[in-house]
Amino acid sequence: MAKNNSQSGIKERVALRVKTPRKYKVILLNDDFTPMDFVVMVLTQIFRKNEAEATAIMLEVHHKGQGVAGVYTLDEALTRSNRAMQWARDEGFPLRVKCEPE
Ligand code: TYC
C-alpha cells in the first residue's frame, strides 16, 4: 500500500488496526454520593470482577479519583459503561464512567 505521508505513516497504522482492533479502558470516576457497596455491585455484576477485585478497584477510585473497571472492544466498553450509568441513574446515584483507548 502506498504511503502518502512519510512522517505519520497513517496508512501503515490503518493496515495494522484491521488485524488488531483497538481496546478501550472503562474508567470509573469518584464522587461523594454513590455508595461503596453499590460500586462493588456494579463491578461484580457488570464487569464480572470477584468480590476482592471489585473492592480493590472501588477503593482505588475512592482514594485516587479514578480506576479501571476493565478493558474491552469499543462495543463492549460502551455497552458496559452505559449499563453501569443507567443502573446508577435508576437508583438515583451520580456515578460517572468514561471510556478511553488503552
Ligand atoms: N466516594 C464514594 C463514597 O465515599 C464511593 C465511590 C467509589 C463512588 C467509587 C464512586 O466510582 C466510585 N461513598
Image: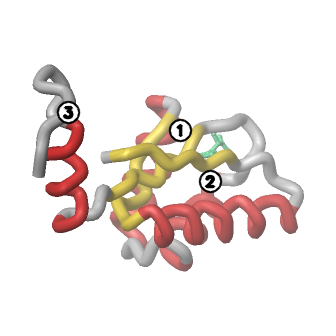
Along the viewing direction, whichever of 57 and 90 lies nearer the viewer: 90
Q: Which residue is mark 3?
A: 4
Left or right of 45: which side holds 6? left
Residue placed at 37% from the left, 45% from the top? Answer: 101
Mark 2–mark 1 Cα distance, whole angstroms, equals 8 Å
Q: Earlier in the sequence, mark 3 or mark 1?
A: 3
Q: Earlier in the sequence, mark 3 or mark 2?
A: 3
Q: Which residue is mark 2?
A: 36
Q: Is residue 46 above or below residue 2?
A: below
The mark closer to the camera, 3 or 1, is 3
Given the image, on which type of amino acid does mark 1 rest?
His
Tell me if the residue at label 2 has its CB under 8 Å from ligand 1: yes
Q: Which residue is mark 1?
A: 62
Q: Is residue 38 above or below residue 101?
A: below
Number of marks? 3
Left or right of 35: which side holds 92? right
Quarter location, residue 90: bottom right
Disc 1 is placed on an element classified as helix
Quarter location, residue 79: bottom right
